[in-house]
Amino acid sequence: MKRTNFVFTVFALLFIFTFARPSTEPVKIKIIADKANVYLQPSENSLVIATVEKGKVLNIFGTGAEKGEWYYVFFTLEERRAKIGGFVRSSMAEIIRPQVEKKEITQKEIEEKENEKMTEEERKEVVKAGEKTVKEIKEETKKTEEISKAVKSEERKAQIAVEKAPISSKKDGIKVGLGLIGGYAMPSKSKYSEGVIYGGNIYLLISKNLAIAISGLSFQSDVEEDPEALSAGKLSVIPLSLSLQGRLPVNDFLTPYIEVGGSYFLNDFSLNNSIVSSWNNVGFDINEEVEKSIGLQVGMGLDLFISKSFIFNIDCKYFINNTNGSWELIDQVSNEKISGNLDGLDMSYIYIGFGLKYLFSF
């Protein structure tokens, strides 16, 4: 956890990138009867799939009663460690709605803000303290000219050094490279495990300050059960990315860069066998899926030219992967089924990796 916080801190110092996503709290009901049955269909003649005790809080689809006098609910059944959905009589429960608190600005707070304002005399003192004499301005102008001459001299020395350097990125012509990538991925949500990530890329060096990268990575994560999201299982993510690099060469051997682009995420999820088996034992088939998605990535890196053709690379990126999913429960005898959506699944992660590229010059 400390490692993840450290990476976030370093990353924030180099990039100002704020993401916000509104969220809404689902409508819930609380059971007020001593016991309430959960039916497969909105009928007391339907199959009873669970019984809940008084005081149990359940999520519902929609904002009120559905199909007449029934609530369409979903919740996690502890003994089966999986989500379940069905219908509960509205007379057995009451709706719990979130309360929004309003904060009013008091007269005292208004007066405190007024007292913080500067008076006209204080402003004049600030202006007077900041005034400079003509002599000071001339001295500063002279210093500026001396600094400008020194900078030009250093720029000329750097230009001569580039011309004599054995490795050169100033040569005209586009360079194409192929690379291998390996590293470590750290999801932003604790329900997803960290793990190894690997893949490859195609690198197009347009100029010493601009490059295009096309990459494909593979990452697998163990998923812990979340009553509001996925059940326990295995998540596989393959981002196919197109990025634009802004390169800032320090010399012919060392080039840091910043990167921004888009990704198409091939997301795949499979439930744990124990969950599937437990539902099969009671006559049901269960399935959960996640959708493919389009997202963004931002990052930074460092290219170290170890020869004219080989580059050793250090890379750090933040992949933004927000998607949706669905679940389905099917009665093996009657073939009746219930299903629902899993909206707003956050599968974003930070990636730190190393790579080796080989450049072809044309």
Image: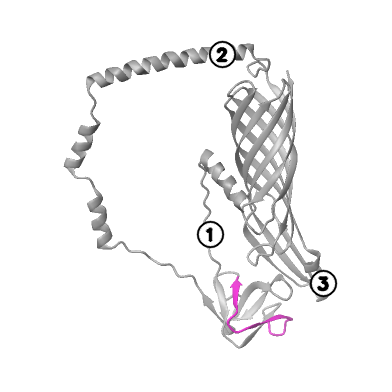
Q: Residue at x 49, y 70 (%)?
A: 98
Quarter holding the N terminus?
A: bottom right
In the rendered structure, which amino acid carries the disc numbered 2? Gln
Residue 166 place in picture, x, y as percent? 68, 15
Q: Residue at x 61, y 11 (%)?
A: 163
Mark 1 sits on what residue?
23
In the rendered structure, which amino acid carries the disc numbered 1? Ser
Tell whether position 52 is magenta: yes
Mark 2 sits on what residue?
159
Viewer can see residue 15 = no
- Specify few, some or many for label 2: CA neighbours under 10 Å numbering under 14, 14-19, or 20 or more: few
In the rendered structure, which amino acid carries the disc numbered 3? Asn
Q: Nearer the viewer, residue 237 or 46?
A: 237
What SS does tag 1 mark?
loop
Disc number for residue 280: 3
Q: Nearer the viewer, residue 231 or 160?
A: 160
Q: Residue at x 47, y 14 (%)?
A: 152
Residue 231 place in picture, x, y as percent? 71, 64
Residue 37 place in picture, x, y as percent? 67, 83
What SS does tag 2 mark?
helix
Viewer can see residue 176 = yes
**Marks 1 and 3: CB-CB under 8 Å?**
no
- Specify few, some or many for label 3: CA neighbours under 10 Å numbering under 14, 14-19, or 20 or more: some
State which tag comes first along the sequence, 3 or 2.
2
**Marks 2 and 1: CB-CB under 8 Å?**
no
Separation (CA) of disc 3 from disc 2: 73 Å
Q: Which residues are magenta?
A: 43-60
What SS does tag 3 mark?
helix
- Specify few, some or many for label 1: CA neighbours under 10 Å numbering under 14, 14-19, or 20 or more: few
